[in-house]
Amino acid sequence: MPRDRSSLRLLLLQIRDGAQVRREEHQSFANYCRVKPEQIEVLNLFDTPAVRPDAAEGYDALLVGGASEANVLEPEKYPFVENAKALLLSSLERDQPVFASCFGFQLAVLALGGRIRHKDQGFEMGTLPISLTLAAGKDPLFWDMPDPFMAVSVHRQYATELPKRCQVLALTDACIHAFKVKDRRFWAFQFHPEVDKKILVERLTYYKAHYTDGDDHLDQVLACAQETPESNALMTAFVDRVLLA
């Protein structure tokens, strides 16, 4: 029997240190999942670095957010990286539905045995068109997406190839942007399905010292920003077509 949306209990694995962005990210996931914020419990890795592999058991799905204060390629500096990878693998093997964004995408690639690369300059930032692969046409989340579609993407770390267990669904010339693990309800996105234009403006302004070369550079990026309704609809599709189907 289909479940009722109001009965869902979700876990958000969060990798945010600043209070403002913690609140905004939690609310953004709730908005686009179309659930109440209290239905999403937050487990923040900065608060609980020793997260257990079974921490997501008992929830209807695991959500994973982005990060700007951490780097998946520096596990010695951020010891929660290895613990988070173990959590993702535990959810994967139990076929618990997973929706992983940005940092979550990078964690998933590493956990599955793939490689994440790094750019100090010339990395994707702002809203950009993302293209679909042929496999996307048969995917539960992507089958009705336009090609290309606009999405928010701000990241220095990226992947250009994936382990064989993964099916590429979306990409740009620079990198892979979405994949599904074959035979599992596990999706990962390098772009941010939970972030819209309004939140991009707020978040990039908050992190401008981290990503931009100053106010002029920030203004240039934000002046080109577009709305991203198709990308944001992916989270709603995840709930409707996977959790409630």
Image: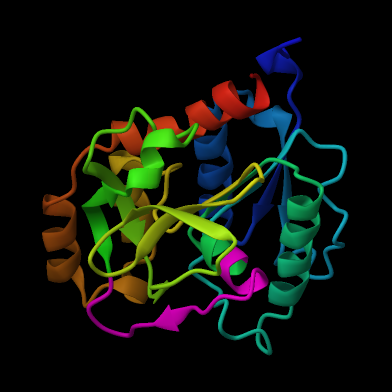
Q: Could you say which quadrant of the image residue 123 lies in?
A: bottom left
Residue 45 shown in magenta: no
Residue 113 shown in magenta: yes
Q: What quarter of the picture does the N terminus occupy?
A: top right
The answer to whether 48 appears left or right of 5 in the picture is right
Q: Is residue 142 visible?
A: no
The prevailing secondary structure element of the residues shown in magenta is loop
Residue 237, image x, y percentages: 49, 27
Identify whether 132 is placed above or below 86.
above
Residue 4, image x, y percentages: 71, 12
Identity of the residue drawn at 60% across and 67% down? 107
Residue 55, image x, y percentages: 85, 53
Q: Which residues are magenta?
A: 108-123
Residue nearest the observer in this picture, 221 or 118: 118
The answer to whether 132 appears left or right of 41 in the picture is left
Identity of the residue drawn at 71% across and 28% down? 39
